[in-house]
Structure formats: structure tokens, C-alpha cells
Image: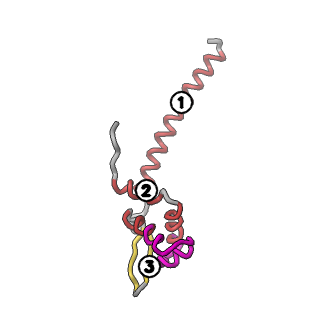
Amino acid sequence: MVQYSAPALDLSFAALADATRRGVIEQLGRGEASISDLAERFRMTLTGMKKHVAVLERAGLVVTRKVGRVRRCALGQRGLAAEAAWIEAQRVLFEARFAALDRVLSEMQGEDDNGH
């Protein structure tokens, strides 16, 4: 079996697999926030939120910058275009397979209706 390898996609999908991290992305879509604000919003420890932000940062989905003693978070520049393109390609493949299955089932139904 051929293994598909795209490290950037792997990091993104791994980061987005967690509901809290998806929530952080949604929250940052509304505007910047400090790690403290995010931790409070998601009712978790500062250490826990730092770990979530680090995963998102490694995936390039979030950037952080230090402003005084506060670490501010914002959405990363790269966006999710590559991930959306991969999902769309898979959707097209699935639809083609389901359309082929529908044709086979219709042919089988037609044979049953004709008494075969």
C-alpha cells in the first residue's frame, strides 16, 4: 500500500482533530487574544492552553507574539487552502465512487424488474 506523505497536511489535520483547538481557531477568527484570555474562555489551565497553542503554531495555523509580559495569538497567514483542496479532491473521488455504485445498483434493479 502506498503511503501518502504531506507533513504540512498531517500537522494541520492533527491540530484540527481536537475540539478545543478548533474552538481556538474559531475564536481567533474573531480577533487576536492572549493565551490567558483563551485559557479562561475554554476553562482550562494556562499550561494546557499553551500546549494547544503550540500545536496550532507548529501547524502554521496560529502565530504568537510577545507584547510585554503577554503572549498574543492570531491566525497564521497560510490559512487552510491546502487542507480544503485535499478535502475537495477526496469529496470528488467519493462522489464518483458512489455514482458508479448507484449505476450498478440501478442496473441490478433493472435486471430484477425484467425477471432476470
Which disc is residue 101 wearing?
1
Q: Nearer the viewer, mark 1 or mark 3?
A: 3
Residue 35's x, y, as percent? 47, 76
Mark-to-mark CA distance, 3 and 2: 23 Å
The residue indicated by pointer 2 is 14
Q: What crowding class fits label 2: few (fewer than 14 Cα within 10 Å), some (14-19), or many (20 or more)? A: some
Magenta stretch encompasses residue 71: no
Mark-to-mark CA distance, 1 and 2: 31 Å
Name the foreground residue: 113 vs 47: 47
Mark-to-mark CA distance, 1 and 3: 50 Å
Tag 1 and tag 2, C-beta contact below 8 Å: no
25 shown above or below 85 = below
Amino acid type at image mark 2: Ala
Which disc is residue 9 wearing?
none
Q: Earlier in the sequence, mark 1 or mark 3?
A: 3
Residue 116's x, y, as percent? 61, 12
The secondary element bearing badge 2 is classed as: helix
Magenta stretch encompasses residue 36: yes
The residue indicated by pointer 3 is 72
Q: Main secondary structure of the magenta part?
A: helix
Q: Residue at x 50, y 71 (%)?
A: 28
Say left or right for 65 vs 109: left
Q: Quadrant of residue 57?
A: bottom left
Q: Residue at x 51, y 30 (%)?
A: 100
Name the foreground residue: 109 vs 74: 74
Amino acid type at image mark 3: Arg
Q: Earlier in the sequence, mark 3 or mark 2?
A: 2
Name the foreground residue: 13 vs 50: 50
The secondary element bearing badge 1 is classed as: helix
Please give the range of residues in magenta: 29-51
